[in-house]
Amino acid sequence: MKVFSLFRRRTGQDGGRSGPVRIGAAEQSLVRVTLNGQVREAHCEPRMLLSDFLRHALGATGTHVGCEHGVCGACTVQVDGVAMRSCLMLAVQADGRSVDTVEGLAQGESLSDLQAAFHRHHSLQCGFCTAGILMSCDDYLRRYPQPDEQALREMLSGHLCRCTGYSPIVAAVLEVAAARAAADGDNKAGRNEE
Ligand code: FES
Ligand code: FES
């Protein structure tokens, strides 16, 4: 049976880099990430998926795992602020990077505006898909603060929700976009009056 292995850079005695070496499947790698603002680390096998690392090594079980091959979107987290499928990334690839999961959206007991809008619009039923959808929408709203509904629906087509339907999700995201735009306008008006 072929032994799973990864390549990593070999560091020479002079500290220089001298080409890749193979990492055996049983070898444990120390992976350190900044998870929701806190530095966390654990050892894992080099073949461990980021999704499994978050759930099983760091106990961040808010991230769900559905298909494990990049189709359903349930496992979506943000790596360095960008939404990514954590089932398509190895934990070792996240070493030294910032990872945000659904657990980091709320501030203490206060839901984020996006989470609160999902609650108001009944944008979830079983909730299995919700963590991933929230992480994608959070990233999407940063990049497209005033999204067009069609484009938003296309983005959401990367997530499978089997029980809620997408209309309440779209309504929640558009409501948040409108509220943020209004608050931004108020802030600018306030600054102009000063
Ligand atoms: S579990 Fe990652 S996309 Fe489905
Ligand atoms: S809320 Fe159940 S799968 Fe989306």
Image: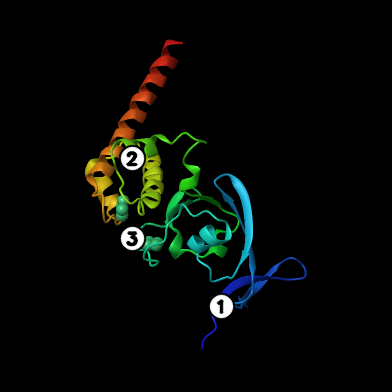
Q: Nearer the viewer, residue 158 or 184?
A: 158
Q: Nearer the viewer, residue 128 or 139?
A: 128
- Which of the two discs, 2 and 3, labels the residue nearer the N terminus? 3
Residue 41, percent across and down?
63, 57
Identified by mark 1, the residue type is Ser
Q: Tell me if 6 is positioned left or right of 13 in this view.
A: left
Identified by mark 2, the residue type is Phe
Q: Secondary structure at mark 1?
A: loop
Please name the residue that numbered disc 3 is placed on. Answer: 72
Against 139, residue 18 (above or below) is below
What residue is drawn where x is 44% and y is 36%?
Answer: 111
Q: Residue furthest front?
A: 126
Please name the residue that numbered disc 2 is placed on. Answer: 118
Q: Quadrant of residue 84?
A: bottom left
Disc number placed over residue 5 in the picture, else none? 1
* Marks 2/1: CA–CA distance: 42 Å
